[in-house]
Image: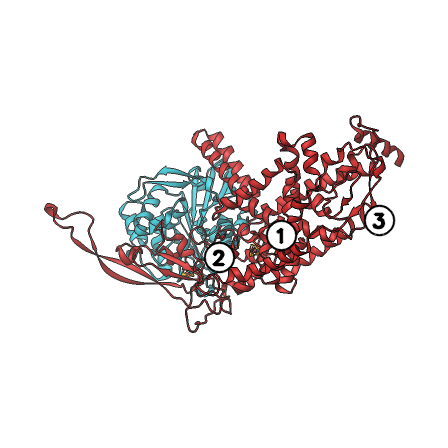
Chain colours: A red, B cyan
């Protein structure tokens, strides 16, 4: 029975005639190569599914007054040991689910960098682009040349990793800028998905413009479907996201010249796993004598880890894709448990001085950015953090710029900061009320934040039921632009949308003079009229800084009411009032 | 016009009010596509009384199907994030359970249209509301800080997309314009629980009060004129009701109509 299946499989996998001695690869390797391909596709699909689900779409079945995300959408981040290591160094604690990353460390101790070769969705993207995308510069001998180990450039990722860990030790999880899971979520979630939605929206406009009912209805149905599976029911926009997308495109484009450039040269998570991989029980053994230098292994190598005969295998660089053994026609390469170590290099060949210098550079970078005037002095009023965020210093220790919070926000309120909070704050979340305000009873951003930069708060804490509500800033009126204040025109949309009870915006009703819009008789000065208006005011003790007023203010270009970060609950220094009036609500 | 009181079950109140007008069959014919338009404006729960009571909505849907409707749609263009509003108001589930199609107001559902109003000329209009055989308005009666009180006529704000925040500058005229453009087959005003202050969205349970009343009417102006008395106002204090009256959309002298109390 088993033998029958074996011969079957052998036939399926045998394919075309093999060159050289034509010794077929072991069946187990062929199976493993296919298992790896399925795993890659599967994990990429799960990753994208989680990303699509990082948001809120209502459901007919849900009773719920309490709205939560549909599942562990941040799972890939929780399983990311580089994130775990950074936050451990910066906060000396392990936040909730991040303990999951221990499982990936364990996996690496057994099998080496299988995470890179089998699981990482960003790695899979690079694998895919490196496969379909090679330029004519990357065929045959050139490809072989690029797939040989290039120690100098491949060392860069280790130095980056060390520098980021150094930065973490001095209090900043800035390494998230280059963590592959963070990069993937940020670039796909904030760039690729909204851009695709934009294109689909324009296509639907074109369908609507045909005026043909059947076409319009099909268009609407397609939009409904996409809005309930891939994106949300409205178009999302993200602050300066062009830069994030450009970097993604550039890094994918590099696969044309060096396959998996990102994984080999830049990825700090890959480097982190590489350091652990040297202890792996599973690895490669080579029979150098049999190698004919056909270089078939190098054509397919992912990690540029020297699988060919005659040189030592770089275990820390290998992604465990198994393509080499599968390709080798001469029976040189064997993956097995507890392989002989004679022809293996397990540790990256790093220059000790550069290692020290990298760590020092990372550690020094943080104080250097902090003496710029962004945190302690001259705190920027636009740095409005999501509700439940911890105090700014601790926030920077925790936030890995993964963009989960920005992706999940149902109102498109959270955005990747540009330089609002200094260079160190690049891509950390800030609220831009003009694009979206913070929905009163929503707590989703804290729900998905993998590091606790935004704490998991309850509706009761946020709304302030029998306690003080969580405030993220305070609203101010620009009286010169406000319709009732300066133009004798009724409005107070801000007051309508203010969600607190009692409302933080209150209005005094009064009669004001207003010049008539039409001239008097014989071209005389237009006569004066008296109109009744309600003039809005903010009560800073009640305002929670949600930004609803700013969002809905009809002064389109520069609103007459706007929110700044002052008065935020999380800060003891960014305050206005001497004492906060306490109020409770039910 | 019919007022149903003396019961605490919102479904029965709704049923009684509609029956007193001659039953749903008077308004919905076999094979009709019916749009039921509640107020699903705010991310609030039923206890806050900022949206229409979900049981009232479900009952109207049920009756429309009983009267032979082919398809019943429940929808609104919310003020807060629509998915949250639809879910937390309880309307999504209640309406789904009785077989209605729920349409979330996605951007693609709005198309520019001429409304020919005094202030409302051309606006993006929420298409499900205009592509129907019959429209049943199911607003909630509540306090409104700028418009004083709102129920039936103001509920048509949910017809508009775009930057409707500008409409507040002429809130009364715009409400009258909308009510001129869309005159429903039937209006069922939910006053089961009424927001007495801090309208239109409230936020504090103490702001709302149980009145256990449902009003059914074929005259939207009269419906507003009657229900505003629930928060202690009269139609004369509310300019858009007067405008509706003057435009001949209905009468603000509801006392002149035959009002059945059940
Ligand atoms: S910022 Fe506000 S609306 Fe956005 S996810 Fe966080 S709590 Fe929700
Ligand atoms: S605050 Fe946002 S970007 Fe930062 S770690 Fe949390 S979810 Fe990620
Ligand atoms: S930010 Fe504006 S809408 Fe929000 S609580 Fe303050 S005043 Fe009200």
Give residue A422's mark.
2
Check disc 2: other Cα within 10 Å, few if <14, some if 14-19, many if 20+. some
Q: Please name whichever residue, A580 or B127, is drawn nearer the observer in this view of the structure.
A: A580
Chain to which the residue tagged by mark 3 belongs:
A
Asked if marks 3 and 2 fall on the same chain, the answer is yes
Q: Please name whichever residue, B88 or B20, is drawn nearer the observer in this view of the structure.
A: B88
Give residue A316's mark.
none
Q: Which residue is mark 1?
A: A160
Residue B67: where, in percent of width, then height? Answer: 49, 41
Q: Please name whichever residue, A440 or A279, is drawn nearer the observer in this view of the structure.
A: A279
Of labels 1 and 3, earlier in sequence is 1
Q: Which residue is mark 3?
A: A338
Distance between the Cα atoms at labels 3 and 2?
Answer: 49 Å
Check disc 1: other Cα within 10 Å, few if <14, some if 14-19, many if 20+. many
One can see residue A460 in this view: no
Of labels 2 and 1, earlier in sequence is 1
Chain to which the residue tagged by mark 2 belongs:
A
At numbered mark 2, what does the secondary structure look like: helix, strand or loop? loop
């Amino acid at each position: 029975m088993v033998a029958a299946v074996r011969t079957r499989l052998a036939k399926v996998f045998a394919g075309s005639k093999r060159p050289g001695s034509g010794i077929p690869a072991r069946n187990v390797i062929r199976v493993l190569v296919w298992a790896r391909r399925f795993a890659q596709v599967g994990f990429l699909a799960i990753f994208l599914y989680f990303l699509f689900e990082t948001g809120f779409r209502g459901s007919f079945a849900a009773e719920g007054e309490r709205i939560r995300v549909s599942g562990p959408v941040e799972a890939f981040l929780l399983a990311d040991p580089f994130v775990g290591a950074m936050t451990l160094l910066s906060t000396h604690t392990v936040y909730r689910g991040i303990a999951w990353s221990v499982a990936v460390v364990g996996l690496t101790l057994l099998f080496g960098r299988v995470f890179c070769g089998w699981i990482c969705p960003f790695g899979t993207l690079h694998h895919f682009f490196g496969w379909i995308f090679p330029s004519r510069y990357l065929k045959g001998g050139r490809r072989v040349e690029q797939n040989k180990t290039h120690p100098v450039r491949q060392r860069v990722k280790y130095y980056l990793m060390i520098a980021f860990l150094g930065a973490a030790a001095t209090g900043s999880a800035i390494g998230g800028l280059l963590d592959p899971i963070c990069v993937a979520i940020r670039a796909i979630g904030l760039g690729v998905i909204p851009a695709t939605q934009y294109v689909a929206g324009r296509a639907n406009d074109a369908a609507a413009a045909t005026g043909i009912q059947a076409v319009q209805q099909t268009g609407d149905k397609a939009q409904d479907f996409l809005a309930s599976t891939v994106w949300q029911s409205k178009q999302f926009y993200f602050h300066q996201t062009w830069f994030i997308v450009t970097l993604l495109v550039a890094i994918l484009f590099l696969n044309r010249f060096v396959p998996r450039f990102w994984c080999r040269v830049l990825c700090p998570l890959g480097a982190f796993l590489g350091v652990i991989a040297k202890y792996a029980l599973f690895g490669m053994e080579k029979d150098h004598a049999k190698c004919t230098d056909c270089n078939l292994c190098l054509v397919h190598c992912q990690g540029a880890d020297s699988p060919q005969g005659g040189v030592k295998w770089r275990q820390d660089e290998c992604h465990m894709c198994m393509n080499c053994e599968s390709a080798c026609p001469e029976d040189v390469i064997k993956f097995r448990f507890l392989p002989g170590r004679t022809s293996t290099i397990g540790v990256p060949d790093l220059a000790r001085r550069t290692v020290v210098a990298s760590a020092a550079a990372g550690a020094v970078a943080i104080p250097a950015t902090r003496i710029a005037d962004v945190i302690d002095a001259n705190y920027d009023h636009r740095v409005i953090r999501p509700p439940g965020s911890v105090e700014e210093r601790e926030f920077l220790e925790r936030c890995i710029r993964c963009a989960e919070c920005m992706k999940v926000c149902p109102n498109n309120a959270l955005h990747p900061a540009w330089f609002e909070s200094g260079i160190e704050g690049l891509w950390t979340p800030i609220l831009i009320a003009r694009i979206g305000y913070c929905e009163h009873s929503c707590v989703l951003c804290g729900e998905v934040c993998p590091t606790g930069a935004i704490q998991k708060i309850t509706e009761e804490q946020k709304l302030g039921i029998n306690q003080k509500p969580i405030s993220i800033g305070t609203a101010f009126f620009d009286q010169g632009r406000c319709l009732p204040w300066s133009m004798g025109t009724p409005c107070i949309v801000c007051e309508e949308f203010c969600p607190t009870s009692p409302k933080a915006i209150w209005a005094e009703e009064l009669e004001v003079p207003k010049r008539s819009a039409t001239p008097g008789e014989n071209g005389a000065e237009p006569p004066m009229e008296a109109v009744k208006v309600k003039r809005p005011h903010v009560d800073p003790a009640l305002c929670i800084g949600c930004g609803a007023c700013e969002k809905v203010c009809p002064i389109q270009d520069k609103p007459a009411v706007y929110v700044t970060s002052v008065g935020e609950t999380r800060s003891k220094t960014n305050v206005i009032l001497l004492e906060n009036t306490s109020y409770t609500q039910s | 016009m019919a007022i149903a009181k003396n019961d605490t079950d919102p479904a029965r109140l709704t049923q009684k009010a509609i029956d007193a007008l001659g039953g749903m069959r008077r308004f919905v014919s076999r094979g009709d596509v019916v749009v039921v338009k509640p107020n699903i404006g705010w991310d609030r729960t039923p206890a806050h009384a900022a949206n229409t009571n979900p049981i009232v909505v479900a009952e109207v849907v049920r009756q429309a199907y009983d009267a032979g409707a082919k398809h019943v749609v429940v929808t609104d263009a919310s003020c807060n994030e629509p998915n949250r509003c639809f879910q937390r108001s309880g309307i999504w589930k209640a309406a789904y359970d009785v077989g209605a199609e729920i349409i979330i107001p996605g951007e693609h559902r709005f198309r520019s249209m001429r409304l020919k109003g005094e202030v409302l000329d051309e606006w993006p209009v929420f298409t499900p509301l205009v592509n129907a055989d019959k429209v049943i308005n199911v607003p909630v009666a509540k306090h409104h800080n700028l418009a004083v009180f709102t129920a039936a006529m103001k509920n048509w704000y949910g017809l508009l997309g775009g930057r409707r925040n500008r409409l507040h500058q002429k809130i009364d005229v715009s409400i009258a314009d909308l009510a001129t453009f869309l005159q429903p087959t039937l209006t069922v005003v939910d006053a089961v629980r009424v927001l007495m202050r801090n309208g239109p969205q409230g936020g504090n349970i103490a702001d709302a009060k149980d009145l256990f009343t449902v009003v059914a009417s074929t005259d939207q102006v009269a419906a507003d004129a009657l229900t505003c008395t629930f928060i202690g106002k009269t139609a004369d204090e509310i300019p858009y009701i007067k405008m509706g009256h003057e435009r001949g959309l209905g009468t603000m002298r509801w006392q002149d109509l035959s009002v059945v109390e059940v």
